[in-house]
Image (spheres, grey):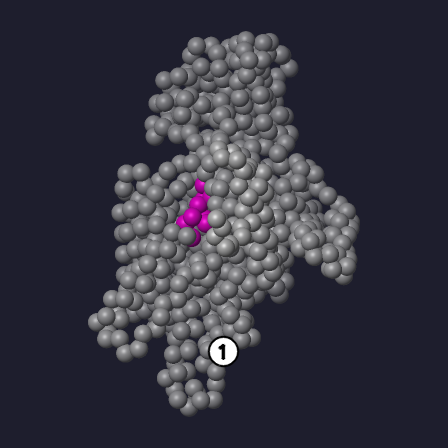
């Protein structure tokens, strides 16, 4: 009997499967899915151009040996030529890889070119000098006090050609802070920018190279007024702008007081000199510290507020509304607003990057293009990286670019609600509130996921309640704090900013109360040890796949995006030594015991967080329980383990004999003594001069050492 139908399905003997046929069909189906999704990316491949460019720029910074400019320029030229040849030959399968390779090579070349163009003298060694120069700006304060950025005119002991373009000096004690534009004479301990606190950690010297800061130190007295010749016009303009910023910050603090005014001044002018340290720590623990530094959030709120206000004003004036495009007029006003805010903020790198991003979006409106799109973000990112290739390795750019890409991708995927006609307000308003709350939750969640890997890797801390704190603060910052700060700052030079600043101060008070409340909760912050360096670029590529790929295969990026979280951590080092040998920390289980708790404490804290270790609150008591320490010497009570000498002169023979027990690690801040140290592993000043900070692991054969400078390689910023 037949059914009247013919089938192409072949059935084998009963009880037998047809594995080859099944596998072939599965492979064919998978191939069709992949091919369809690749075809769907035809309008998305351009979005990967800044990713490739940024990876190339980051690759330049990660090199161990400085390449020659002609070599990288030749490589970039060959890669670009290959991409053009492939496109001309219409070899479709190779066109996209060739173009992305060309962008990566261009990023590598841009990094080298930028490093060459910003090259400036760097102080060779630390010494006491008399410094005369102009105060360019007042930087964010450090643990030691206020910090000045100075343009030196003369530094004692240095030839004019060896004088740095900029130096940064911390004012010890509490002397009056000279405002920008002041000519000063100052006696200071000045040296080269410091190297990483531990191998693989943040390299301040590299950032200082690109900022043309060639010396860092601290004052040995109060600054005095100096008589100097007139500075160059460009420097005069910069100091005049910074003086106006400093004056505005002082007026804001005078209006609102230190607790609220310090935060307000930081959000308007970038000056953080008045924020109490405990307030900063509470903001960090609650995940709100990003609000203190001027970045994309501030530019977006100010630019968006001006855009909305101007567009509403045009629409409310019928004569103008009939004769002008309100959207374009508002975009032009928003462009001027973010430009003015950039000047008032002092144009720190995060603000510059945010202004470029906002500017591209407003220009898109003027050109009748979609303002908020991944394409506009790609153009902005490419412009930023072309001007500042070094930004590819900075946490600020990585986090802001990843968060913005995630939010724009979310906006693309967010379902558009159907617009209802003549819905009663008592239904429409609750619906709008639900939609806004859901969008805010989704945006905060997605942005937190996108920035999480970078926060873990760079800062080793996760704010457990950061999502809650940001959701509570978001309405305050968007609708109260930033708009009224903008109005108050604009009117304060006329003496009319008081009412607006008062409203902003109320919002800041609410925000800091929320931050303090969240920071005080148990487990508010979780310390996460750093993953190996390879994990971060893998996580970045995974996040980009999730954001830029169109289709179901985007979820293949999820395990890559979690690389920083999931990557196994190597065993923590047994010993850490500062770059000058002055501070030593020894691991005991999950604790870090400091042999000199008052020396290089900031560096010790950074190292312990990177390795997931805890420093006891009573650091000196924890040390004394395990070590016998005098004024300069420190050694374990059992005669094994680690011994350290903190004096700058070599120890005497009797002291050296006590330190040098067989099998012991001996750390000398001084040069190595003429007499040997039989049976001990000795590290002395000359080793730290060559290698910088160090981490050590105990092995069966002795000690394994990893030096910071070995990881940094032979680069212009490595002294």
Secondary structure under the numbered disc 1 in the rendered image: helix
**Residue 263 occupies which quadrant of the picture?**
bottom left
Q: Quadrant of the C terminus?
A: top right
**Residue 701 occupies which quadrant of the picture?**
top right
Which residue in the protein does label 1 denote?
A: 328
Is residue 657 depicted above or below 398 in this figure?
above
Horizontally, residue 425 falls left or right of residue 218, namely: left
Segment colored magenta: 447-459
Point 46% across, 62% down: residue: 412
Can residue 272 be seen from the camera position used here? no
Residue 308 x, y percent position in the rendering? 40, 73
Can residue 594 be seen from the camera position used here? yes
Horizontally, residue 606 falls left or right of residue 708, namely: left
Point 39% across, 75% down: residue: 309
Residue 430 x, y percent position in the rendering? 25, 66
| Residue 148 vs residue 107, the one in the foreground | 107
């Amino acid at each position: 009997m037949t059914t009247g139908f013919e089938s192409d399905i072949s059935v084998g003997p009963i009880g037998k499967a047809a594995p080859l046929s099944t596998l072939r069909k599965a492979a064919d189906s998978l191939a069709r899915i992949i091919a369809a999704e690749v075809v769907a990316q035809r309008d998305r491949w351009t979005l990967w151009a800044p990713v490739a460019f940024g990876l190339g720029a980051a690759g330049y910074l990660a090199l161990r040996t400085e390449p020659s400019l002609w070599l990288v320029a030749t490589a970039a030229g060959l890669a670009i030529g290959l991409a053009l040849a492939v496109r001309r030959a219409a070899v479709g399968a190779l066109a996209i890889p060739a173009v992305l390779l060309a962008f990566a090579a261009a990023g590598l070349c841009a990094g080298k070119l930028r490093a060459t163009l910003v090259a400036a003298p760097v102080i060779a060694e630390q010494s006491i000098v008399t410094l005369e120069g102009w105060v360019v700006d007042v930087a964010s304060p450090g643990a030691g006090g206020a910090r000045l950025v100075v343009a030196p005119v003369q530094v004692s002991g240095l030839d004019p050609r060896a004088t740095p373009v900029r130096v940064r000096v911390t004012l010890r004690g509490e002397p009056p802070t000279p405002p920008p534009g002041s000519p000063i004479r100052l006696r200071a301990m000045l040296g080269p920018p410091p190297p990483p606190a531990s191998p693989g950690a943040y390299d301040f010297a590299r950032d200082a190279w690109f900022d043309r800061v060639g010396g860092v130190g601290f004052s040995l007295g109060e600054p005095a007024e100096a008589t100097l010749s007139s500075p160059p016009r460009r420097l005069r303009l910069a100091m005049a702008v910074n003086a106006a910023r400093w004056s505005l910050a002082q007026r804001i603090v005078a209006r609102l007081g230190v607790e609220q005014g310090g935060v307000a001044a930081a959000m308007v002018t970038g000056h953080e000199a008045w924020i109490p340290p405990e307030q900063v720590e509470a903001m960090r623990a609650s995940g709100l510290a990003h609000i203190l530094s001027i970045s994309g959030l501030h530019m977006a709120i100010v630019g968006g507020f001006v855009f909305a206000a101007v567009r509403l004003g045009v629409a409310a004036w019928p004569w103008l509304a009939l004769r002008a495009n309100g959207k374009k007029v508002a975009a032009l006003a928003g462009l001027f607003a973010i430009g003015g805010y950039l000047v008032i903020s002092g144009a720190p790198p995060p603000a510059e990057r945010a202004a470029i991003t906002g500017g591209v979006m407003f220009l898109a409106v003027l050109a009748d293009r979609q303002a908020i799109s991944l394409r506009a973000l790609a153009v902005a990112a490419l412009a930023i990286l072309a001007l500042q290739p070094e930004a590819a390795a900075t946490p600020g750019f990585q986090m802001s670019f990843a968060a913005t890409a995630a939010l724009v991708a979310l906006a693309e995927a967010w379902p558009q609600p159907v617009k209802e006609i003549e819905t009663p307000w008592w239904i429409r308003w609750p619906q709008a509130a639900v939609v806004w709350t859901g969008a805010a939750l989704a945006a905060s969640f997605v942005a937190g996921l996108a920035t999480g890997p970078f926060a873990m890797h760079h800062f080793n801390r996760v704010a457990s309640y950061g999502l809650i704190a940001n959701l509570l603060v978001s309405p305050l910052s968007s609708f109260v704090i930033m708009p009224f700060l903008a109005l108050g700052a604009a009117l304060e030079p006329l003496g009319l900013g008081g009412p607006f600043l008062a409203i902003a101060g109320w919002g800041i008070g609410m925000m800091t109360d929320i931050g303090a409340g969240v920071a005080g909760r148990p487990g508010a912050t979780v310390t996460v040890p750093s993953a190996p360096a390879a994990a971060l670029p893998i996580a970045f590529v995974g996040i980009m796949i999730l954001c830029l790929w169109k289709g179901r295969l985007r979820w293949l990026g999820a395990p890559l995006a979690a690389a920083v979280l999931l990557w196994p951590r190597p065993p923590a080092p047994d010993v850490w030594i500062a770059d000058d040998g002055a501070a030593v920390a020894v691991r005991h289980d999950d604790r870090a015991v400091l042999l000199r708790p008052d020396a290089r404490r900031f560096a010790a804290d950074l190292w312990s967080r990177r390795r997931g270790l805890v420093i006891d609150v009573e650091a000196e008591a924890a040390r004394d329980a395990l070590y016998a320490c005098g004024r300069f010497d420190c050694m374990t009570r059992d005669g094994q383990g680690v011994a350290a000498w903190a004096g700058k002169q070599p120890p005497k023979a009797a002291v050296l004999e006590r330190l040098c027990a067989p099998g012991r690690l001996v750390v000398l801040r001084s040069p190595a003594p003429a007499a040997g140290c039989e049976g001990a592993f000795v590290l002395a000043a000359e080793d730290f001069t060559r290698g910088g900070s160090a981490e050590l692991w105990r092995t069966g054969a002795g000690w394994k050492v990893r030096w910071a400078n070995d990881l940094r390689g032979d680069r212009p910023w490595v002294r």
